[in-house]
Image (tube, rainbow, N blue to C red):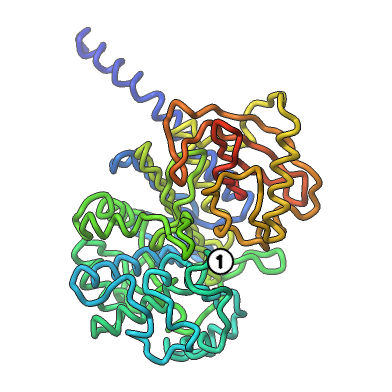
Protein backbone atom coordinates (compact mmCIF):
# COMPACT_ATOMS: atom_id res chain seq x y z
CA UNK A 1 0.00 0.00 0.00
CA UNK A 2 1.37 3.44 -0.94
CA UNK A 3 1.95 6.06 1.74
CA UNK A 4 -0.88 8.15 0.33
CA UNK A 5 -3.35 5.23 0.42
CA UNK A 6 -2.16 4.24 3.90
CA UNK A 7 -2.69 7.77 5.17
CA UNK A 8 -6.14 7.89 3.62
CA UNK A 9 -7.04 4.54 5.19
CA UNK A 10 -5.87 5.64 8.63
CA UNK A 11 -7.79 8.92 8.33
CA UNK A 12 -10.96 6.98 7.49
CA UNK A 13 -10.37 4.57 10.37
CA UNK A 14 -9.90 7.37 12.89
CA UNK A 15 -13.00 9.11 11.56
CA UNK A 16 -15.02 5.95 12.17
CA UNK A 17 -13.84 5.42 15.76
CA UNK A 18 -16.37 7.82 17.39
CA UNK A 19 -19.22 6.28 15.38
CA UNK A 20 -18.17 2.74 16.32
CA UNK A 21 -17.91 3.73 19.98
CA UNK A 22 -21.40 5.19 19.91
CA UNK A 23 -22.71 2.07 18.21
CA UNK A 24 -21.20 -0.10 20.93
CA UNK A 25 -22.80 2.08 23.63
CA UNK A 26 -26.20 1.81 21.95
CA UNK A 27 -25.79 -1.97 21.70
CA UNK A 28 -24.97 -2.13 25.40
CA UNK A 29 -28.09 -0.13 26.29
CA UNK A 30 -30.35 -2.36 24.19
CA UNK A 31 -28.85 -5.65 25.35
CA UNK A 32 -28.91 -4.65 29.03
CA UNK A 33 -32.53 -3.57 28.65
CA UNK A 34 -33.48 -6.84 26.96
CA UNK A 35 -31.86 -8.87 29.73
CA UNK A 36 -33.45 -6.85 32.52
CA UNK A 37 -36.94 -6.90 31.00
CA UNK A 38 -36.74 -10.38 29.43
CA UNK A 39 -37.46 -9.01 25.97
CA UNK A 40 -37.20 -11.68 23.26
CA UNK A 41 -36.49 -9.43 20.27
CA UNK A 42 -35.83 -5.82 19.29
CA UNK A 43 -35.37 -3.85 16.07
CA UNK A 44 -33.50 -0.54 16.38
CA UNK A 45 -32.86 2.25 13.89
CA UNK A 46 -31.21 5.58 14.70
CA UNK A 47 -31.46 8.37 12.14
CA UNK A 48 -29.64 11.69 11.80
CA UNK A 49 -31.30 14.12 9.40
CA UNK A 50 -32.94 11.19 7.67
CA UNK A 51 -29.78 9.11 7.24
CA UNK A 52 -29.31 5.85 9.12
CA UNK A 53 -26.62 6.12 11.81
CA UNK A 54 -27.35 2.70 13.21
CA UNK A 55 -29.61 -0.16 12.25
CA UNK A 56 -29.49 -3.32 14.32
CA UNK A 57 -31.64 -6.31 15.17
CA UNK A 58 -31.42 -8.26 18.42
CA UNK A 59 -32.78 -11.54 19.74
CA UNK A 60 -35.73 -13.53 18.53
CA UNK A 61 -39.02 -12.76 16.86
CA UNK A 62 -40.26 -16.21 17.91
CA UNK A 63 -38.83 -17.87 21.01
CA UNK A 64 -40.27 -21.32 20.29
CA UNK A 65 -38.71 -21.49 16.84
CA UNK A 66 -35.62 -19.44 17.74
CA UNK A 67 -36.33 -17.21 14.74
CA UNK A 68 -34.01 -14.18 14.78
CA UNK A 69 -35.26 -10.64 14.31
CA UNK A 70 -34.33 -9.36 10.84
CA UNK A 71 -34.92 -6.23 8.78
CA UNK A 72 -38.07 -7.94 7.47
CA UNK A 73 -39.57 -8.71 10.90
CA UNK A 74 -42.98 -7.11 11.36
CA UNK A 75 -44.06 -5.85 14.80
CA UNK A 76 -47.40 -4.55 15.99
CA UNK A 77 -47.01 -0.85 16.87
CA UNK A 78 -50.23 -0.44 18.87
CA UNK A 79 -50.87 3.21 19.77
CA UNK A 80 -48.31 4.50 17.29
CA UNK A 81 -51.18 3.74 14.89
CA UNK A 82 -52.77 7.00 16.06
CA UNK A 83 -50.37 9.14 14.02
CA UNK A 84 -51.28 7.18 10.88
CA UNK A 85 -54.99 7.68 11.55
CA UNK A 86 -54.30 11.39 12.07
CA UNK A 87 -52.57 11.48 8.67
CA UNK A 88 -55.62 9.80 7.10
CA UNK A 89 -57.90 12.45 8.58
CA UNK A 90 -55.61 15.23 7.35
CA UNK A 91 -55.63 13.75 3.85
CA UNK A 92 -59.44 13.83 3.87
CA UNK A 93 -59.27 17.46 5.00
CA UNK A 94 -57.01 18.17 2.02
CA UNK A 95 -59.52 16.42 -0.25
CA UNK A 96 -62.25 18.71 1.11
CA UNK A 97 -64.16 15.74 2.55
CA UNK A 98 -64.19 16.85 6.21
CA UNK A 99 -63.02 19.60 8.55
CA UNK A 100 -60.80 19.18 11.60
CA UNK A 101 -63.12 21.35 13.65
CA UNK A 102 -66.32 19.71 12.45
CA UNK A 103 -68.37 18.10 15.24
CA UNK A 104 -68.23 14.31 15.34
CA UNK A 105 -72.03 14.29 15.17
CA UNK A 106 -71.73 15.40 11.53
CA UNK A 107 -70.24 12.01 10.68
CA UNK A 108 -71.48 9.84 13.56
CA UNK A 109 -75.01 11.19 14.06
CA UNK A 110 -76.04 8.76 16.80
CA UNK A 111 -73.53 9.98 19.39
CA UNK A 112 -74.78 10.88 22.89
CA UNK A 113 -75.85 14.53 23.41
CA UNK A 114 -72.79 15.21 25.59
CA UNK A 115 -70.53 14.25 22.67
CA UNK A 116 -72.06 16.61 20.12
CA UNK A 117 -69.53 19.39 20.75
CA UNK A 118 -66.53 17.09 20.38
CA UNK A 119 -64.59 18.00 17.24
CA UNK A 120 -62.65 15.66 14.97
CA UNK A 121 -59.50 17.48 16.06
CA UNK A 122 -60.26 16.77 19.73
CA UNK A 123 -60.56 13.06 18.99
CA UNK A 124 -56.95 13.13 17.76
CA UNK A 125 -55.32 15.46 20.30
CA UNK A 126 -56.98 13.83 23.34
CA UNK A 127 -58.97 16.85 24.51
CA UNK A 128 -62.36 15.24 23.79
CA UNK A 129 -63.10 14.09 27.34
CA UNK A 130 -63.56 10.49 26.21
CA UNK A 131 -62.02 7.77 28.31
CA UNK A 132 -59.58 5.13 27.08
CA UNK A 133 -61.44 1.85 26.77
CA UNK A 134 -58.12 0.00 26.51
CA UNK A 135 -58.22 0.07 30.31
CA UNK A 136 -60.99 -2.52 30.08
CA UNK A 137 -60.28 -6.23 30.67
CA UNK A 138 -59.39 -8.76 28.01
CA UNK A 139 -62.93 -10.14 27.74
CA UNK A 140 -64.15 -6.71 26.59
CA UNK A 141 -61.88 -6.97 23.52
CA UNK A 142 -62.46 -10.65 22.88
CA UNK A 143 -66.26 -10.58 22.95
CA UNK A 144 -66.95 -7.62 20.64
CA UNK A 145 -66.80 -8.39 16.95
CA UNK A 146 -67.31 -5.10 15.11
CA UNK A 147 -66.41 -1.43 15.35
CA UNK A 148 -70.11 -0.75 15.95
CA UNK A 149 -70.13 -2.96 19.05
CA UNK A 150 -67.16 -1.05 20.47
CA UNK A 151 -68.83 2.23 19.53
CA UNK A 152 -72.06 1.20 21.28
CA UNK A 153 -70.13 0.26 24.42
CA UNK A 154 -68.32 3.62 24.40
CA UNK A 155 -71.59 5.54 24.09
CA UNK A 156 -72.67 4.27 27.50
CA UNK A 157 -69.63 5.84 29.19
CA UNK A 158 -69.54 9.32 30.72
CA UNK A 159 -67.15 12.00 29.54
CA UNK A 160 -64.27 12.70 31.95
CA UNK A 161 -64.71 16.44 31.32
CA UNK A 162 -66.36 18.81 28.86
CA UNK A 163 -64.75 18.72 25.38
CA UNK A 164 -61.76 21.07 25.20
CA UNK A 165 -61.54 21.57 28.96
CA UNK A 166 -58.29 19.65 29.45
CA UNK A 167 -56.17 16.76 28.15
CA UNK A 168 -56.61 13.06 28.90
CA UNK A 169 -55.36 10.19 26.79
CA UNK A 170 -58.34 8.47 25.20
CA UNK A 171 -59.62 6.17 22.48
CA UNK A 172 -60.67 9.16 20.36
CA UNK A 173 -58.50 8.02 17.41
CA UNK A 174 -60.62 4.84 17.23
CA UNK A 175 -63.64 7.02 16.45
CA UNK A 176 -61.50 9.03 14.02
CA UNK A 177 -60.76 5.77 12.21
CA UNK A 178 -64.50 5.10 11.96
CA UNK A 179 -64.98 8.59 10.50
CA UNK A 180 -62.22 7.95 7.93
CA UNK A 181 -64.05 4.85 6.75
CA UNK A 182 -67.42 6.56 6.61
CA UNK A 183 -66.23 9.67 4.78
CA UNK A 184 -63.98 7.76 2.36
CA UNK A 185 -66.66 5.15 1.65
CA UNK A 186 -64.20 2.27 2.02
CA UNK A 187 -62.97 0.21 5.01
CA UNK A 188 -60.30 1.85 7.16
CA UNK A 189 -57.73 -0.79 6.21
CA UNK A 190 -58.31 -0.22 2.50
CA UNK A 191 -57.99 3.55 2.78
CA UNK A 192 -54.74 3.23 4.71
CA UNK A 193 -53.32 0.82 2.14
CA UNK A 194 -54.31 2.78 -0.96
CA UNK A 195 -53.72 6.35 0.27
CA UNK A 196 -50.77 5.96 2.64
CA UNK A 197 -48.89 2.65 2.61
CA UNK A 198 -48.78 2.03 -1.15
CA UNK A 199 -47.98 5.63 -2.21
CA UNK A 200 -45.12 5.70 0.29
CA UNK A 201 -44.00 2.19 -0.72
CA UNK A 202 -44.27 0.95 2.85
CA UNK A 203 -44.51 -2.60 1.56
CA UNK A 204 -44.40 -4.28 4.98
CA UNK A 205 -47.01 -2.07 6.67
CA UNK A 206 -50.67 -3.00 7.02
CA UNK A 207 -53.70 -2.95 9.28
CA UNK A 208 -53.82 -6.14 11.36
CA UNK A 209 -55.87 -8.80 9.66
CA UNK A 210 -55.24 -7.30 6.21
CA UNK A 211 -51.59 -8.16 5.60
CA UNK A 212 -50.02 -10.38 2.94
CA UNK A 213 -50.34 -14.15 3.17
CA UNK A 214 -46.64 -14.66 3.86
CA UNK A 215 -44.98 -12.39 6.35
CA UNK A 216 -42.22 -12.54 8.95
CA UNK A 217 -44.39 -11.50 11.89
CA UNK A 218 -42.96 -11.35 15.40
CA UNK A 219 -44.74 -13.23 18.16
CA UNK A 220 -45.81 -10.95 21.00
CA UNK A 221 -45.03 -11.77 24.64
CA UNK A 222 -46.16 -10.67 28.09
CA UNK A 223 -45.05 -11.47 31.62
CA UNK A 224 -47.56 -13.59 33.52
CA UNK A 225 -46.85 -15.10 36.94
CA UNK A 226 -43.20 -14.20 36.54
CA UNK A 227 -42.87 -16.10 33.25
CA UNK A 228 -42.62 -14.92 29.66
CA UNK A 229 -45.69 -16.09 27.73
CA UNK A 230 -47.41 -15.31 24.46
CA UNK A 231 -49.64 -12.23 24.45
CA UNK A 232 -53.41 -11.98 24.67
CA UNK A 233 -55.50 -12.93 21.66
CA UNK A 234 -58.17 -10.37 20.70
CA UNK A 235 -61.09 -10.32 18.28
CA UNK A 236 -60.12 -9.26 14.73
CA UNK A 237 -61.98 -5.91 14.94
CA UNK A 238 -60.23 -5.06 18.22
CA UNK A 239 -56.91 -6.01 16.68
CA UNK A 240 -57.40 -3.70 13.69
CA UNK A 241 -58.89 -0.56 15.24
CA UNK A 242 -57.83 2.91 14.14
CA UNK A 243 -56.15 3.60 17.47
CA UNK A 244 -54.01 0.45 17.73
CA UNK A 245 -54.27 -1.66 14.59
CA UNK A 246 -51.12 -1.25 12.46
CA UNK A 247 -48.13 -3.57 12.05
CA UNK A 248 -44.88 -2.56 10.35
CA UNK A 249 -41.09 -2.85 10.29
CA UNK A 250 -38.45 -0.47 11.60
CA UNK A 251 -37.32 0.08 8.00
CA UNK A 252 -40.79 1.12 6.89
CA UNK A 253 -40.95 3.57 9.78
CA UNK A 254 -37.89 5.34 8.40
CA UNK A 255 -39.92 5.89 5.22
CA UNK A 256 -42.76 7.22 7.36
CA UNK A 257 -40.53 9.74 9.12
CA UNK A 258 -39.06 10.80 5.79
CA UNK A 259 -42.56 11.47 4.49
CA UNK A 260 -43.40 13.58 7.56
CA UNK A 261 -40.16 15.53 7.08
CA UNK A 262 -41.32 16.68 3.64
CA UNK A 263 -44.53 17.30 1.72
CA UNK A 264 -44.41 13.90 0.07
CA UNK A 265 -47.64 12.78 1.77
CA UNK A 266 -49.16 15.82 3.50
CA UNK A 267 -49.08 19.51 2.69
CA UNK A 268 -47.12 21.92 4.85
CA UNK A 269 -50.41 23.17 6.30
CA UNK A 270 -51.43 19.65 7.30
CA UNK A 271 -48.02 18.97 8.88
CA UNK A 272 -48.35 22.19 10.87
CA UNK A 273 -51.70 20.97 12.15
CA UNK A 274 -50.24 17.58 13.07
CA UNK A 275 -47.41 19.08 15.15
CA UNK A 276 -49.28 22.02 16.69
CA UNK A 277 -50.02 22.19 20.44
CA UNK A 278 -53.64 21.46 21.30
CA UNK A 279 -55.63 24.55 22.26
CA UNK A 280 -58.09 24.38 25.16
CA UNK A 281 -61.31 26.29 25.67
CA UNK A 282 -59.64 28.92 27.86
CA UNK A 283 -57.03 29.66 25.19
CA UNK A 284 -54.20 27.80 26.94
CA UNK A 285 -52.27 25.06 25.18
CA UNK A 286 -51.07 21.57 26.06
CA UNK A 287 -48.23 19.68 24.33
CA UNK A 288 -50.36 17.20 22.42
CA UNK A 289 -50.49 17.09 18.63
CA UNK A 290 -52.51 14.95 16.26
CA UNK A 291 -51.24 11.45 16.99
CA UNK A 292 -48.05 12.76 18.61
CA UNK A 293 -46.89 13.92 22.01
CA UNK A 294 -44.96 17.17 21.86
CA UNK A 295 -43.88 17.64 25.47
CA UNK A 296 -40.34 19.08 25.53
CA UNK A 297 -37.50 16.93 26.83
CA UNK A 298 -34.60 18.74 28.54
CA UNK A 299 -35.86 21.99 27.05
CA UNK A 300 -35.64 20.63 23.50
CA UNK A 301 -38.65 20.10 21.23
CA UNK A 302 -39.57 16.50 20.60
CA UNK A 303 -42.14 14.56 18.62
CA UNK A 304 -42.73 11.14 20.05
CA UNK A 305 -45.25 8.42 20.65
CA UNK A 306 -45.09 4.88 21.90
CA UNK A 307 -47.25 1.82 21.65
CA UNK A 308 -47.79 -0.87 24.28
CA UNK A 309 -50.23 -3.64 23.42
CA UNK A 310 -51.49 -6.53 25.51
CA UNK A 311 -51.01 -8.77 22.49
CA UNK A 312 -47.33 -8.57 23.47
CA UNK A 313 -45.60 -5.54 21.94
CA UNK A 314 -43.95 -2.24 22.86
CA UNK A 315 -42.65 0.37 20.43
CA UNK A 316 -41.58 3.99 20.21
CA UNK A 317 -40.53 6.74 17.86
CA UNK A 318 -38.53 9.47 19.61
CA UNK A 319 -37.90 12.27 17.11
CA UNK A 320 -35.78 15.28 18.09
CA UNK A 321 -36.22 17.78 15.23
CA UNK A 322 -33.69 20.35 16.48
CA UNK A 323 -30.81 17.86 16.60
CA UNK A 324 -32.09 15.86 13.62
CA UNK A 325 -31.96 12.59 15.57
CA UNK A 326 -34.75 10.02 15.53
CA UNK A 327 -34.81 6.71 17.39
CA UNK A 328 -37.11 3.88 16.31
CA UNK A 329 -37.50 0.88 18.63
CA UNK A 330 -39.79 -2.11 18.10
CA UNK A 331 -39.94 -4.85 20.75
CA UNK A 332 -42.06 -7.96 21.16
CA UNK A 333 -42.68 -7.70 24.90
CA UNK A 334 -45.58 -5.77 26.45
CA UNK A 335 -44.75 -2.98 28.93
CA UNK A 336 -41.03 -2.91 28.45
CA UNK A 337 -40.42 0.89 28.76
CA UNK A 338 -39.35 1.38 25.13
CA UNK A 339 -39.79 5.16 25.33
CA UNK A 340 -37.24 5.53 28.13
CA UNK A 341 -34.77 3.38 26.23
CA UNK A 342 -35.33 5.50 23.14
CA UNK A 343 -34.20 8.57 25.08
CA UNK A 344 -31.21 6.69 26.46
CA UNK A 345 -30.14 5.65 22.96
CA UNK A 346 -30.56 9.26 21.81
CA UNK A 347 -28.19 10.22 24.63
CA UNK A 348 -25.48 8.15 22.95
CA UNK A 349 -25.61 10.48 19.96
CA UNK A 350 -26.47 13.76 21.74
CA UNK A 351 -25.32 14.44 25.33
CA UNK A 352 -28.42 16.55 25.98
CA UNK A 353 -30.33 13.29 26.48
CA UNK A 354 -28.03 11.28 28.75
CA UNK A 355 -29.97 9.55 31.57
CA UNK A 356 -30.33 11.38 34.87
CA UNK A 357 -28.68 8.43 36.64
CA UNK A 358 -25.45 9.10 34.73
CA UNK A 359 -25.21 12.73 35.75
CA UNK A 360 -22.35 13.65 38.08
CA UNK A 361 -23.47 14.44 41.67
CA UNK A 362 -23.44 18.14 42.52
CA UNK A 363 -24.19 20.26 45.57
CA UNK A 364 -27.54 22.01 45.80
CA UNK A 365 -26.90 25.70 46.36
CA UNK A 366 -30.62 26.42 46.62
CA UNK A 367 -32.02 23.77 49.02
CA UNK A 368 -35.31 25.65 49.44
CA UNK A 369 -35.99 25.20 45.74
CA UNK A 370 -36.38 21.42 46.07
CA UNK A 371 -39.07 21.86 48.72
CA UNK A 372 -40.86 24.53 46.69
CA UNK A 373 -40.93 22.33 43.58
CA UNK A 374 -41.94 19.24 45.55
CA UNK A 375 -44.82 21.21 47.06
CA UNK A 376 -45.84 22.19 43.55
CA UNK A 377 -46.09 18.53 42.51
CA UNK A 378 -48.16 17.83 45.63
CA UNK A 379 -50.61 20.60 44.75
CA UNK A 380 -50.91 19.33 41.17
CA UNK A 381 -51.51 15.78 42.42
CA UNK A 382 -54.54 17.11 44.28
CA UNK A 383 -55.89 18.82 41.18
CA UNK A 384 -54.74 22.30 42.19
CA UNK A 385 -54.07 24.92 39.53
CA UNK A 386 -52.95 27.95 41.55
CA UNK A 387 -49.23 27.49 42.12
CA UNK A 388 -47.03 30.56 42.68
CA UNK A 389 -43.98 28.58 41.50
CA UNK A 390 -45.40 28.18 37.99
CA UNK A 391 -45.52 30.60 35.09
CA UNK A 392 -48.88 31.84 33.82
CA UNK A 393 -48.60 29.62 30.75
CA UNK A 394 -47.76 26.44 32.65
CA UNK A 395 -49.92 23.63 31.17
CA UNK A 396 -51.86 22.65 34.30
CA UNK A 397 -54.51 20.85 32.32
CA UNK A 398 -52.03 18.48 30.72
CA UNK A 399 -51.40 16.52 33.91
CA UNK A 400 -53.54 13.70 35.22
CA UNK A 401 -53.60 14.04 38.99
CA UNK A 402 -53.82 10.25 39.36
CA UNK A 403 -50.48 9.88 37.57
CA UNK A 404 -48.88 12.47 39.82
CA UNK A 405 -50.32 10.79 42.91
CA UNK A 406 -48.73 7.55 41.79
CA UNK A 407 -45.45 9.35 41.13
CA UNK A 408 -45.38 10.81 44.65
CA UNK A 409 -46.51 7.66 46.44
CA UNK A 410 -44.26 6.90 49.40
CA UNK A 411 -42.15 10.03 48.89
CA UNK A 412 -41.48 12.87 51.29
CA UNK A 413 -38.97 14.97 49.39
CA UNK A 414 -36.82 15.27 46.28
CA UNK A 415 -33.06 14.92 45.99
CA UNK A 416 -31.13 17.36 43.81
CA UNK A 417 -29.36 15.89 40.77
CA UNK A 418 -28.13 19.08 39.14
CA UNK A 419 -29.15 21.92 36.81
CA UNK A 420 -28.05 22.75 33.26
CA UNK A 421 -28.05 26.35 32.07
CA UNK A 422 -29.48 26.12 28.56
CA UNK A 423 -30.19 29.82 28.05
CA UNK A 424 -27.73 29.98 25.13
CA UNK A 425 -29.96 27.65 23.14
CA UNK A 426 -32.66 30.38 23.15
CA UNK A 427 -35.36 27.74 23.45
CA UNK A 428 -38.93 28.68 24.26
CA UNK A 429 -41.60 26.58 25.93
CA UNK A 430 -45.21 27.74 25.67
CA UNK A 431 -43.91 31.04 24.34
CA UNK A 432 -41.50 31.73 27.22
CA UNK A 433 -37.72 31.54 27.27
CA UNK A 434 -36.09 28.65 29.12
CA UNK A 435 -33.09 29.44 31.31
CA UNK A 436 -32.30 26.10 32.86
CA UNK A 437 -33.42 22.53 33.36
CA UNK A 438 -33.13 21.15 36.89
CA UNK A 439 -33.17 17.47 37.80
CA UNK A 440 -34.37 15.84 41.00
CA UNK A 441 -35.11 12.33 42.20
CA UNK A 442 -38.14 11.42 44.29
CA UNK A 443 -37.55 9.13 47.26
CA UNK A 444 -40.82 7.22 46.81
CA UNK A 445 -41.52 3.65 45.81
CA UNK A 446 -39.96 4.02 42.34
CA UNK A 447 -37.23 6.66 42.98
CA UNK A 448 -38.22 8.26 39.70
CA UNK A 449 -36.27 11.26 38.34
CA UNK A 450 -38.22 14.44 37.58
CA UNK A 451 -37.10 17.51 35.63
CA UNK A 452 -38.26 21.13 35.73
CA UNK A 453 -37.82 23.77 33.02
CA UNK A 454 -37.32 27.18 34.66
CA UNK A 455 -37.24 30.73 33.35
CA UNK A 456 -34.88 33.49 34.48
CA UNK A 457 -37.10 34.25 37.49
CA UNK A 458 -37.13 30.64 38.64
CA UNK A 459 -40.75 30.12 37.54
CA UNK A 460 -41.65 26.64 36.30
CA UNK A 461 -42.46 26.52 32.61
CA UNK A 462 -42.88 22.76 32.39
CA UNK A 463 -42.46 19.62 34.49
CA UNK A 464 -41.45 16.25 33.05
CA UNK A 465 -42.68 13.80 35.71
CA UNK A 466 -41.65 10.75 33.68
CA UNK A 467 -37.93 11.36 33.29
CA UNK A 468 -35.51 8.53 32.66
Q: Quadrant of the N terminus?
A: top left
Residue highlighted by disc 1: 221
Tell me: residue 305, above or below residue 360.
below
Q: Quadrant of the C terminus?
A: top right
Residue 102 visible in the displayed image: yes
Q: How many marks?
A: 1
Q: Quadrant of residue 337?
A: bottom right
Please state the horizontal and vertical placement of residue 62, each as a whole percent of the image.
49, 64
Q: Residue at x 58, y 75 (%)?
A: 160
Tell me: residue 183, above or below residue 323.
below
Tell me: residue 271, above or below residue 211.
above
Q: Residue at x 59, y 80 (%)?
A: 138
297 or 74, nearer to the observer: 297
Please state the horizontal and vertical placement of residue 339, each as a whole percent of the image.
52, 52
111 or 345, nearer to the observer: 111
Please state the horizontal and vertical placement of residue 379, each as a whole percent of the image.
71, 53
Crowd band around label 1 with a 10 angstrom C-alpha radius: few (<14), some (14–19), many (20+): many
* In the image: residue 62, left or right of residue 269: right
Q: Residue at x 72, y 40 (%)?
A: 372
Amino acid sequence: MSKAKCAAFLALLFALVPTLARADAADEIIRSWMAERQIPGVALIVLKNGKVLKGENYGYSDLARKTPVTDATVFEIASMTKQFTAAAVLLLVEYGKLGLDDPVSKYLPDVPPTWRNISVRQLLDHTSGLYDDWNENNEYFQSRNSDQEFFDALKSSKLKFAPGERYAYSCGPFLAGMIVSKVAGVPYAEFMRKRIFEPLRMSSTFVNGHGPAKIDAAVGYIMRDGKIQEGVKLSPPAHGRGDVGISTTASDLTIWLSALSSTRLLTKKSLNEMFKFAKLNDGSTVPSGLGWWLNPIRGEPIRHHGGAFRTGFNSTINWYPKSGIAVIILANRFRSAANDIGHMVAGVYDPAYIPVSRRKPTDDREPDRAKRLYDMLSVLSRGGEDVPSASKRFPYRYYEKEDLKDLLEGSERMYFRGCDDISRRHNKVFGEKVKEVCFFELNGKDRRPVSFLLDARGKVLYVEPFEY
